[in-house]
Amino acid sequence: MKLFCDEVSTFFSTLSDSEAINTIYNLRNRFFPGEDSKQEILEGLKGIFESDHVFSRLEHAIMAVWNKMI
């Protein structure tokens, strides 16, 4: 898993911000099409944020960005 994460990180580090956002959006449409899938992604992300039993202001802001981005 670490190798995969390193490869993804390396790949995204070569992209501009707009290219990275477009790539994420396109991959979301490819693997998680539709509003139900979008909610599944957001619920998963929220679950990660709540794993420490604190849903911080920063995490709320990140959720808002992801909600608009995907």
Image (cartoon, rainbow, N blue to C red):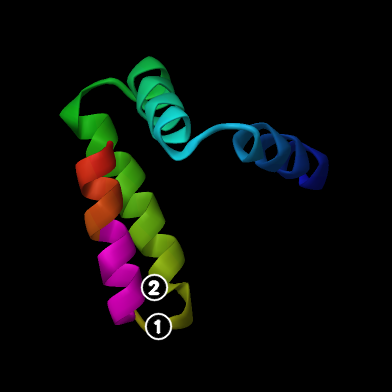
Q: Secondary structure at mark 1?
A: loop
Q: Quadrant of residue 26?
A: top left
Q: Position of residue 27 (x, y in %)?
A: 43, 23
Q: Nearer the viewer, residue 55 or 25?
A: 25
Residue 22 as seen in the image, left or right of residue 70? right
Residue positioned most to the right: 3
What residue is drawn where x is 45% and y is 63%?
48
Quadrant where the C terminus sits is top left
Q: Quadrant of residue 10?
A: top right
What residue is drawn where x is 22% and y is 57%?
64
What residue is drawn where x is 45% and y is 39%?
17
Q: Quadrant of residue 15?
A: top right
In the rendering, which numbered label is found on residue 30? none
Residue 33 as seen in the image, left or right of residue 10? left
Tell me the magenta residue range: 56-63
- According to the image, label 2 marks what residue? 50
Quadrant where the N terminus sits is top right
Between the C-alphas of marks 2 and 1, the distance is: 5 Å
The amino acid sitting under disc 2 is: Glu
Q: Compared to 5, does 54 lie above or below?
A: below
Q: Residues within 10 Å of mark 1 (few under 14, many from 20)?
A: few
Q: Position of residue 28 (x, y in %)?
A: 37, 27
Q: Position of residue 36 (x, y in %)?
A: 20, 32
- According to the image, label 1 marks what residue? 53
Asked if the residues shown at circle 2 and circle 1 are in contact, with their CB atoms under 8 angstroms apart, the answer is yes
